[in-house]
Image (cartoon, grey):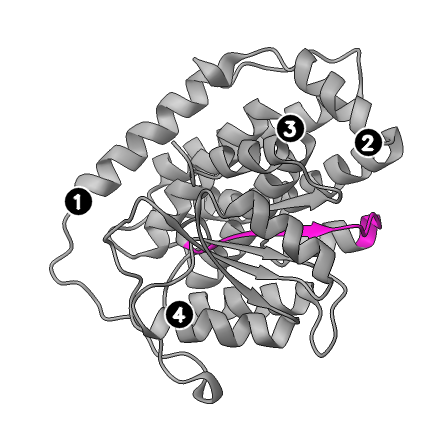
Amino acid sequence: MQGDKKTGQEETSAADRLPKEEIELLYEDCRANLGEIETGLMDIIDYNIKATPEFISRGLRGFHSVNGAAVYLRNESMTALSRAAESVLTEFGAEVEELTIADAEALLSAVDLLKQMTAAESSQSVAAPSIGGELVRLNAILSRQQSATPAELKPAKGIAEASKALPEVPVVQTRRLKVLIAEDDSTSRTILQGLLSKYGDCDVALNGREAVDAFIAAWRTGKGYDLICMDIRMPEMDGTEAVQEIRSLEKSAEIYSSKGVKIFMTTTVRDMKIITTSFKALCDTYLLKPLDGAQLEENMRICGLLS
């Protein structure tokens, strides 16, 4: 199983690309996110309380942020486990069924293993654990969730008044992707268009505000974007603010993080505060320029955009 791979190769690739201090700070941020999820799960297990929408929302944000960092660090085992946990929690967010104590225990086991993995990455004296057992448990819950049929499907809620209502995301999938490139630099736009045009049709936005407007307009037509490549430093609204607004619109329409549009931050900014803020804003990965086709395609495959 892919998730059982030893992460030595992943450690080497991350170490080759990133300063040690940057790697350690990212794993520290992951541990903080996992600690918040752990606290909520322990409350459910110890006090037999129902998972609240607030807990589901915090948990989704935490797992999504951890997953983004794992993709950025090319930690395949951590990517697989955090994505599986996020997928399970996403289905509970859809309110098909309640999260049981047994489900909370399975998620807590995954959280504990993810914390061990961040410790293993930060210390060569700690062996990276196997994730096979946790993936089996999470996949069993996911299979149960997906086989459950709700009594009736709820319509998507309206979003903020200023943005009007968004229709539900269409389930019909096309072979070519619909891509939005939010980039104010003409050279970078041209490079991204050249790299992405073979995968789908590319639209362009020159700043964060245009990106949000394009996202809304596309969704209203029933043909939302599959991928948004978002620069950070842009006029009118920066990329991180645009990501936050897009995720807020999705949440208001009951589109949860793992089922939303994939957002890649594509930037020259290598500031740790901005990187962690981008993951907290729920981008899917963070790519440093100059980009190349192999790098972009690898991340598209990791995020399920390519088979």
> Quadrant of the rendered structure where residue 26 is?
top right
Q: Which residue is mark 1?
A: 148
> In this picture, which residue range is highlighted in magenta?
260-273
Q: Please tell me whether mark 2 sits on a helix, a strand or a loop.
A: loop
Contact between marks 4 and 1 (CB within 8 A): the answer is no
Please tell me whether mark 1 or mark 3 is closer to you in this view: 3
Contact between marks 1 and 2 (CB within 8 A): the answer is no
Q: As rendered, which of 33 and 189 lies closer to the eye? A: 189
Question: What's the residue type where badge 2 is placed?
Answer: Leu
Q: Please tell me whether mark 3 sits on a helix, a strand or a loop.
A: loop
Confirm whether the magenta stretch covers residue 263: yes
Using the numbered discs, state the Cα–Cα distance from disc 2 to disc 3 in whole angstroms.
Answer: 11 Å
Answer with mark 1 or mark 3, whichever residue precedes in sequence.
3
Residue 32 position within the rendered picture, expressed as x and y whole percent measured from the top left: 70, 44
What residue lies at 73% left-to-right and 25% top-to-bottom?
A: 119
Contact between marks 4 and 3 (CB within 8 A): the answer is no
Q: Is residue 92 above or below residue 240?
A: above
Q: Which residue is mark 3?
A: 74
Q: Which residue is mark 2?
A: 18
Q: Which residue is mark 4?
A: 218
Residue 3 position within the rendered picture, expressed as x and y whole percent measured from the top left: 49, 18
Q: As rendered, which of 35 and 255 lies closer to the eye? A: 255
Residue 128 position within the rendered picture, expressed as x and y whole percent measured from the top left: 65, 15
Q: Is residue 140 visible?
A: yes
Q: Is residue 296 left or right of residue 167?
A: right
Answer with mark 1 or mark 2, whichever residue precedes in sequence.
2
Please tell me whether mark 1 or mark 2 is closer to you in this view: 2
